[in-house]
């Protein structure tokens, strides 16, 4: 079951409070961890963004709280190791002694990714002001078999800015993760393409990075909202109420490079249902090189937000996925081989992959129907796709699911509000 942590940024949000942690009882209720009962719920600091990741890959989620003072000074962030595997009890100790831990910064968001596809987890941290005129550069630490090396060259770690979110995803579907970074104070947002050799190229112009002195961007989220096989991006603007009335940005990715992809929804059984904390590894041969890519199912990977819970991989010119390995937080491991690309899948813990074939919901015309109706799908039986027609006479919350012949739900196609119409 998924637990809940609420962090409080001292100096930003009224009177000082400790962080609040709630443990899921598994029956729809939560037990609050008392103040002082855990290092995480002890003391005051500008706790800003809590990001969970199993950085040491021991099977439990560790905690990274970006705690930048945002007052011109620098400080260490609050990073905690989960002792569940070592002691059998989910408690925490604050980490020290690691270069990326002891670094003083104006830290905001932590993301653990394998940007160089070498099989271990690297870390990116966004920095805010730090007392510099144009803000503090961001950080990227490369993991070399447990030794963390701070990257000091390249635009990604030398561009200054009042940075908040760093959002990672394979936006060009070429087999490595790129990154989008938001900036406050009218500074341009940044987009960096992964070159596949450990370096990044900054996008010089275009809507993604245009400077707008009237906009302060904070959260950003990546997800394939139009289900066309590439990652789109939404950016929340109006940081800290300094830019009232500023509209958000929605960037639709019209990628036409024909690179392969897979979109995967993970559903836990022994693991929490959202599969939070699950590791997903995919091995494919791209440009003649066979290597593993890494993703994690995370509910905290942006500034005060998160990406689509579905897992997205890009596969370049690969013809299939040689091996897909899902390491569930429960410790269970599912392995699938020879997986077809350019498809949507659901992976239920302990079961076979299920392909999802419905990709969009379209309004047929502007005629308003007189009643609710759901027509027989066609063709039926179907493989690999079918069309389902329905009508609603008024705006309503619509939920449409597919079940197999055993009465088991295979996929939830729609669960959202739709306007009156024929679909």
Image (spheres, rainbow, N blue to C red):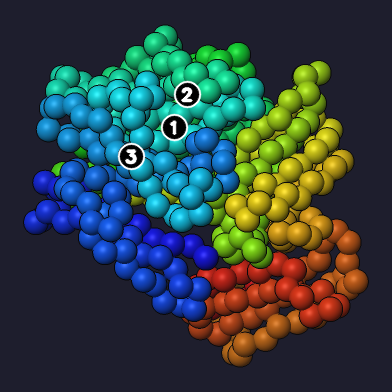
| Mark 3 / mark 2, whichever is N-terminal | 3
- Furthest residue in direction bottom, as rendered: 371
Badge 1 local density, few (<14 within 10 Å), some, or many (20+)? many
Residue drawn at x 25%, y 30% as measured from the top left: 76
Measured along the vertical axis of the image, is residue 88 above or below residue 386? above
- List the single residue furthest toward the left: 15
Instruction: Answer left or right for 216 relative to 297.
Output: left
Q: Nearer the viewer, residue 149 or 97?
A: 97
Please report whichever mark, 2 or 1, sits nearer to the chain's N-terminal start.
1
Residue 370 versus residue 155 in the image, above or below: below
What is the CA distance from the residue labelled 1 to the residue labelled 3?
A: 29 Å
Q: In the rendered structure, which disc, 1 or 3, sits on the residue that comes first in sequence?
A: 3
Question: Height in image: 170 above or below 233?
Answer: above
Report if residue 344 is visible in the image.
no
Q: Are marks 2 and 1 in contact (CB under 8 Å)?
A: yes
Residue at the spot of label 2: 192
Q: Quadrant of the C terminus?
A: bottom right
- Which residue in the protein does label 3 denote? 94
Tell whether 288 sits left or right of 393: right
Q: Secondary structure at mark 2?
A: strand
Q: Residue at x 77, y 19 (%)?
A: 289
The answer to whether residue 260 is visible is yes
In the foreground, 202 or 390: 202
Residue 187 located left or right of residue 22: left
Q: Nearer the viewer, mark 1 or mark 3?
A: 3
User: How many angstroms separate mark 3 from mark 2 (CA)?
Assistant: 32 Å
Question: Where 166 falls versus 236 (above or below)?
Answer: above
Residue 283 coordinates in the image, percent (x, y) = 76, 33
Q: Which mark is residue 180?
A: 1
């Amino acid at each position: 079951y998924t637990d809940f942590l609420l962090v409080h940024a001292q100096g930003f949000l009224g009177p000082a409070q400790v962080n609040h942690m709630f443990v899921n009882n598994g029956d729809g209720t939560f037990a609050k961890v008392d103040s002082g009962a855990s290092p995480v719920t002890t003391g005051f600091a500008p706790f800003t963004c809590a990001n969970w990741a199993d950085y040491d890959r021991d099977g439990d989620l560790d905690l990274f709280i970006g705690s930048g003072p945002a007052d011109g000074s620098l400080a260490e962030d609050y990073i905690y190791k989960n002792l569940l595997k070592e002691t059998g009890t989910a408690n925490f100790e604050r980490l020290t002694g690691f270069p990326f831990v002891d670094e003083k910064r104006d830290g905001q968001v932590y993301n653990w990714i394998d940007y160089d596809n070498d099989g271990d987890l690297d870390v990116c941290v966004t920095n805010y002001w730090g007392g510099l005129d144009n803000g503090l550069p961001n950080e990227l630490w490369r993991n070399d078999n447990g030794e963390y090396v701070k990257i000091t060259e390249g635009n990604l770690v030398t561009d200054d800015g009042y940075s908040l979110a760093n959002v990672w995803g394979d936006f060009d579907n070429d087999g490595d993760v790129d990154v989008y970074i938001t900036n406050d104070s009218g500074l341009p947002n940044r987009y960096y393409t992964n070159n596949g050799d450990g370096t990044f190229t900054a996008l010089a112009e275009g809507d993604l990075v245009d400077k707008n002195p009237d906009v302060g961007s904070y959260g950003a989220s990546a997800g394939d909202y139009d289900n066309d096989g590439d990652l789109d991006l939404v950016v929340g603007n109006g940081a800290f109420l300094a830019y009232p009335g500023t509209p958000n940005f929605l960037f639709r990715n019209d990628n036409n490079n024909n690179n392969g992809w897979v979109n995967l929804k993970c559903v836990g059984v022994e693991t929490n249902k959202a599969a939070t904390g699950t590791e997903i590894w995919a091995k494919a041969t791209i440009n003649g090189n066979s290597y593993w890519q890494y993703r994690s199912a995370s509910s905290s990977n942006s500034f005060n937000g998160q990406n689509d819970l579905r897992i997205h991989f890009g596969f370049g010119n690969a013809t299939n996925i040689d091996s897909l390995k899902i390491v569930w937080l429960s410790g269970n491991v599912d392995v699938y081989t020879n997986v077809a690309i350019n498809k949507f899948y659901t992976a239920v813990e302990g079961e076979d992959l299920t392909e999802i074939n419905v990709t969009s919901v379209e309004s047929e015309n502007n005629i308003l129907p007189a009643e609710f109706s759901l027509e027989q799908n066609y063709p039926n039986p179907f493989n690999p796709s079918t069309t389902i027609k329905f009508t609603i006479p008024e705006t309503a919350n619509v939920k449409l699911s597919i079940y197999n012949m055993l009465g088991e739900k295979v996929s939830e196609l729609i669960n959202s509000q739709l306007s009156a119409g024929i679909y």
